[in-house]
Amino acid sequence: MKLRTHPLMSYRGVSNWPSAWVGTNERHKPLRGERGILQDVVPSQTENASRFFLVIEDEGSQYVGCLLFQDLSFCRQIYKLMIAHRGHTIFQSLMKDILDIVADSALSGAIIGVRYCGRVRNPYCYAMGCGRQGTQRL
C-alpha cells in the first residue's frame, strides 16, 4: 500500500492528495499533481488543528498546499514524515511503501505488529499512528 492511497489520507471522505498548489506570486501558473521539491512543512497555528501546509519549489517557482485530515493523530504522523523528507520530491515522499515509512527514523517504534483499526478496514492503520486499536470489523 502506498501512503497516498491510505484511507486516512482524507478529510470528510475526500482524498487530500494531491493538494491544490497555490503560487506564492500571482505570475505563477497553476500547479497540479505530484511535482516539486518539498522545501518546508508549516504547522497550522490553530490549536489541535488537523492540517499543515507544504511549501514546494517547482521550476524556480514556489507553491503552497494544505493537507487537511479527519484524524488528528494521523495528521501528526504525516507531518513528522514530511519534515523528515524536506529536500526530496513530493512524489518520492508520498510513493514510499508504508513498511519503508515505518522503518523511517521519523516514525521508528510506530509498529509492534500488525493490528487492525476498529473504524477503518486497514491493517496498516495502527502502524501509521492511528491509535485506534481493535479487531477488524467485517
Image (cartoon, rainbow, N blue to C red):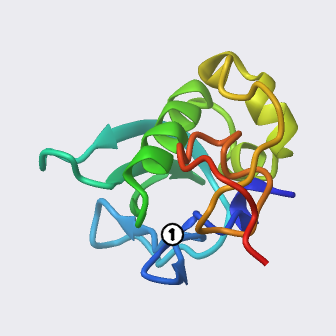
**119 horizontally vs 20: left or right:** right
**Image position of 119 with respect to 130: above or below:** below
Amino acid of disc 1: Ser
- Image x and y of residue 137, in percent: 73, 72
Q: Which residue is drawn at 61% across and 47% down?
A: 133
Q: Nearer the viewer, residue 41 or 24?
A: 41
Q: Which of 122 and 133 is in front in this view?
A: 133
- Image x and y of residue 27, in percent: 34, 72
Disc 1 target residue: 19
Q: Residue at x 59, y 70 (%)?
A: 17
**91 horizontally vs 30: left or right:** right
Q: Nearer the viewer, residue 56 or 127?
A: 127
Figure disc tally: 1
Q: Residue at x 37, y 51 (%)?
A: 72
**43 horizontally vs 14: left or right:** left
Which quadrant is the C terminus positioned in?
Answer: bottom right
